[in-house]
Image (cartoon, rainbow, N blue to C red):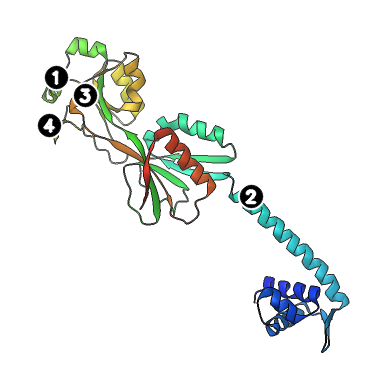
């Protein structure tokens, strides 16, 4: 029996004046109660009970110690109530990893922070593969799936890419009608910061990928600069639809070869597998799913 159990044995014995009755309350034998109290007396260096064949009574030291035990149990009960309340409310520090593209989710992240002001968000934007558990992340958002048996994954609705160009560029250079015609155009390319490779353009015809590597008139490793180059009329660019939707609606950009661009990317949220997901993590997952749409929860 541990120290806390010994305190319980002592308190019940003091209240019932019987090791037998204390044992009934605790579901253990009277001898186990007596041994626990004896060990406690040995640790304290004081006698807690007067013992007789008929009953036990508290010594003066035992009475003082009983009062102290009541305060200990009261503090313990209060601590349990506080922790139970805290564990049921989304709050505390929460570290979230996101891809560089996640910067465009800031309106959703700001709205989340406004709805849950007691959660302290720490956002880490990087395209590198992070070790969620070892690096202390509460959750990460990634593009595509990541298989790890230690993690739980929820797939969210994502995006598709669009080829776009400024109307002024197309008016001056003409609009390509077949993918092969891109070889005669200024193509604005994106280079992955982590690998240094150029992002391929997912061009298809009749459901089959086309082996076309467009020329590069300009190369950049940020989406903002790529969008700026396209809107300035410097060429054709491949960008996620949620980045160019406003520019298309405003007439600053025009879709190019849209029926030939075929790809779909999903956002996924991953978090450590556990029987009890922390309220702050659950709040984040549910909020982002409500904003982006969700395709379900999967085990890694």
Give the mark nearer the N terminus: 1 vs 4: 1
Q: Residue at x 71, y 56 (%)?
A: 78
Q: Position of residue 233 (x, y in %)?
A: 27, 15
Q: Are marks 4 and 3 in contact (CB under 8 Å)?
A: no
Residue 155 position, x and y percent, is: 36, 42
Element on which disc 1 rests: loop
Cα distance in 3D space between marks 3 and 2: 53 Å
Q: Is residue 57 above or below residue 208?
A: below
What is the secondary structure assignment of the residue under circle 3? helix
Of circles 4 and 3, the one toward us is 4
In three-dimensional space, the C-alpha distance between marks 4 and 3, rounded to whole angstroms, equals: 13 Å
Residue 230 position (above or below residue 190): above
Residue ID for mark 1: 177
Measure the C-alpha gap from mark 2 to mark 1.
62 Å
Q: Quadrant of the N terminus?
A: bottom right
How many numbered discs, if any? 4
Mark closer to the chain start, 4 or 3: 4
Label 3 vs 2, first from the N-terminus:
2
Q: Name the spot of residue 277 as percent of width and height, x first.
A: 49, 51
Eye-nearest disc, 3 or 2: 2
């Amino acid at each position: 029996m541990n120290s806390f159990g010994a305190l319980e044995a002592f308190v019940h014995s003091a209240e019932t004046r019987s090791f037998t009755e204390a044992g009934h309350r605790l579901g253990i034998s009277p001898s186990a109660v007596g041994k626990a109290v004896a060990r406690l007396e040995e640790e304290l260096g004081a006698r807690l009970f007067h013992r007789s064949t008929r009953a036990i009574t508290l010594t003066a030291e035992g009475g003082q110690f009983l009062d102290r035990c009541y305060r200990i149990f009261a503090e313990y009960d209060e601590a349990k109530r506080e922790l139970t309340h805290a564990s049921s409310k989304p709050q505390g520090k929460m570290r979230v990893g996101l891809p560089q593209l996640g910067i465009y989710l800031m309106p959703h992240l700001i709205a989340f922070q406004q709805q849950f002001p007691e959660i302290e968000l720490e956002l880490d934007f990087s395209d590198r593969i992070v070790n969620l558990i070892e690096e202390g992340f509460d959750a990460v958002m990634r593009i595509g799936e990541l298989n790890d048996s230690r993690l739980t994954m929820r797939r969210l609705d994502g995006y598709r890419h669009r080829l776009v160009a400024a109307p002024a560029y197309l008016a001056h250079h003409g609009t390509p009608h077949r993918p092969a015609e891109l070889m005669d155009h200024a193509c604005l390319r994106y280079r992955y910061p982590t690998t240094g490779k150029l992002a391929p353009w997912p061009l298809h015809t009749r459901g089959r990928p086309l082996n076309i590597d467009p020329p590069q008139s300009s190369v950049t490793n940020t989406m903002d600069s790529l969008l700026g180059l396209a809107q300035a009329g410097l060429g054709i660019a491949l960008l996620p639809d949620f980045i160019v939707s406003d520019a298309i609606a405003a007439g600053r950009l025009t879709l190019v070869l849209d029926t030939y661009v075929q790809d779909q990317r999903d956002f996924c949220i991953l978090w450590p597998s556990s029987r009890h997901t922390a309220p702050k993590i659950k709040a984040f997952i549910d909020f982002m799913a409500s904003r982006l749409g969700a395709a379900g929860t999967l085990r890694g």
